[in-house]
Amino acid sequence: MTELNFVQARNNMIEQQIRTWNVLDQRVLDFIGQIPRELFVPEQYRDLAYAETNIDIGHGQVMMTPVVEGRILQAAKVHADDKILEIGTGSGYLTALLGNMGGHVYSIEIIPELQRRAEDHLAELGIHNTSLEEGDGSNGWDRYAPYDIIVITGSLPVLPESFQQSLAQGGRLVAIVGEFPLMEARLITREDDNKFNNEYLFTTEIPALINAPQPQHFTF
C-alpha cells in the first residue's frame, strides 16, 4: 500500500469506523488523523493497519481495534497537561496518541522487545513526552502517582484497587475488566478521597495482561 493509500485508509477508518461507533469528540478524531498507525504495525500486517481487527504484534499481544482505541481516548478526556499512566505499551500507537494529547505519559511494558520497538517509533515521530519503562504493571505502578489518567491496554479478570488509589482527584481510569466471553470497558472517575464513579462503556475482547490477578474460584 502506498503512502497516499495509507492516508486515505486513515481517513476512511475515522469516518466509517471510529465516528460511527459514537466517537464524536473532534479533538480525538483530529489526533487519530495525525498519527500514521501503519508505522506501529508489524511489516507483514501493514496492509491491515486500518482494518477493524486486533493485529498480532508478537509475544501473544495484539493492537486493539481502532474503534476501541477511539472510545478509550474519548472516555479518558485527555487534557494537555495531564499526567498519564499506560499499563501495556504494546505497539506504542496508543502511547503516541496519549503523548500528543496529554502532558506526559509513563508507559509500562513487561516485554523488552515491544518496549524497544515502541521507543524507536515514538522517536521517529518526534514524540518525546513519554517515558517507557520495562516492568510488570499488572498490580499497579504508583512510582509517579497520583495520575490524572490511567489506561490499561490488556484485560483484567479482576481490577486491583491499587489503580483507583493511584488516581488524582478528578482522575480517570479506563480498564477492560472480566473474562471471556464477557469483558467490559469501564471508566472509573475519582470524585474525592473515598468516592469513585464507575461507568460501563462497552463490551469487547482482548488478551489479559501478563500476570493479571485472577479471581478466586471456589471449589466444592
Image (tube, grey):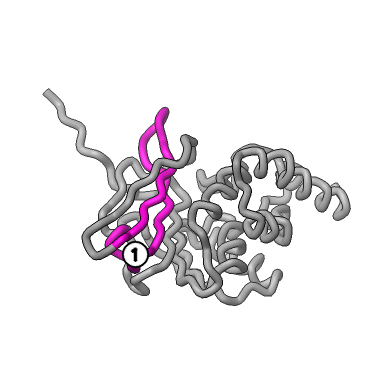
Quarter of the image with the C terminus in it: top left
Judge whether residue 168 is colored magenta. Answer: yes
The number of numbered discs placed on residues in the rendered structure image is: 1
- Residue 208 position, x and y percent, is 41, 43
**Label 1 sits on residue:** 167
- Residue 172 position, x and y percent, is 41, 59
Quarter of image, res 48: top right
Magenta residues, start to end = 164-191
Q: Which residue is found at the position 61% from the left and 57% from the top?
A: 93
Judge whether residue 176 is colored magenta. Answer: yes
Q: Is residue 26 left or right of residue 81?
A: right
Q: Which residue is found at the position 61% from the left and 53% from the top?
A: 25
Specify the principal SS of the magenta part: strand
* Type of amino acid under label 1: Leu
Q: Nearer the viewer, residue 87 or 112?
A: 87
Quarter of image, res 192: bottom left
Find the residue positioned furthest to the top: 220
- Residue 2 position, x and y percent, is 87, 51
Q: Nearer the viewer, residue 159 or 23?
A: 23
